Amino acid sequence: MINTASHCPCGSGNSFGACCKAIHISHAAAAGAEQLMRARYSAFVVRNIDFLYNTFHPSTRRFQDKNAIRKWSVENKWMQLHILKTTFQTVEFEAHYLNTEMEVQIHHEKSTFKKLGNLWYYVDGK
C-alpha cells in the first residue's frame, strides 16, 4: 500500500492522501472526468478493485469481471500516467506499465465519462 504522504501515482504532484485516496474513500470527491480518471489509474496501482468496479457506469458495470480487473492490476507494474487531452466528458491518456515479462507497455485510451447525480462514472474507452 502507498503511504498517504507519498506522491500520488496519478502524477498530479500532490500527496496520495490529498489526491486520489480522498476520491477512493468518497467517490463524490471526484469533481470531473479527469479527477476520476486519475483516481482509477491510482486504483490500479494500489489494487483497489472495488473502487474500479464501482466507478464503472451502472449501465456497463454488469459487463465487468472483478477477477479480470484484479488480475490486470496485480500482474502489471504501473509506472506512470500521462494525460494527453481532456474535455468535459473525455480523457485521453497513456498508462505506462511493465507486463509480466517485464516489457514496457503503453495503454493508450480515450475514455468517456458520464455524470449521474453528483457522481462521475467511467463508461468506456477506445
Image: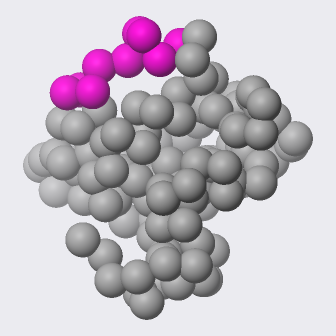
Colouring used for the render: one colour
Q: Nearer the viewer, residue 120 or 12?
A: 120
In this view of the protein, can residue 54 be seen by the observer? yes
Q: Is residue 116 above or below residue 97?
A: above
Residue 8 in the figure: left or right of residue 35? left
In this view of the protein, can residue 10 be seen by the observer? no
Q: Is residue 105 above or below residue 67?
A: below
Relative image position of residue 59 (x, y in whole percent): 59, 11
Of all residues shown, which one is farthest toward the left?
101
- Quick one: quadrant of the C terminus? top right
Residue 67 in the figure: left or right of residue 41? left
Relative image position of residue 96 (x, y in whole percent): 42, 56
Residue at 78 percent across and 31 percent down: it is 117
Magenta region: which residues? 60-68
- Quick one: quadrant of the N terminus? bottom left
Relative image position of residue 55 (x, y in whole percent): 53, 35
Q: Is residue 62 magenta?
A: yes
Relative image position of residue 103 (x, y in whole percent): 22, 53
What count of labels does the image hold? 0
Q: Nearer the viewer, residue 5 or 90?
A: 5
Rendering quarter of residue 124 = top right
Residue at 29 percent across and 19 percent down: it is 65
Q: Is residue 82 above or below residue 73?
A: below
Of all residues shown, which one is farthest toward the right?
88
Rendering quarter of residue 9 = bottom left
Residue at 29 percent across and 32 percent down: it is 69
Q: Is residue 123 magenta?
A: no
Residue at 73 percent across and 45 percent down: it is 33
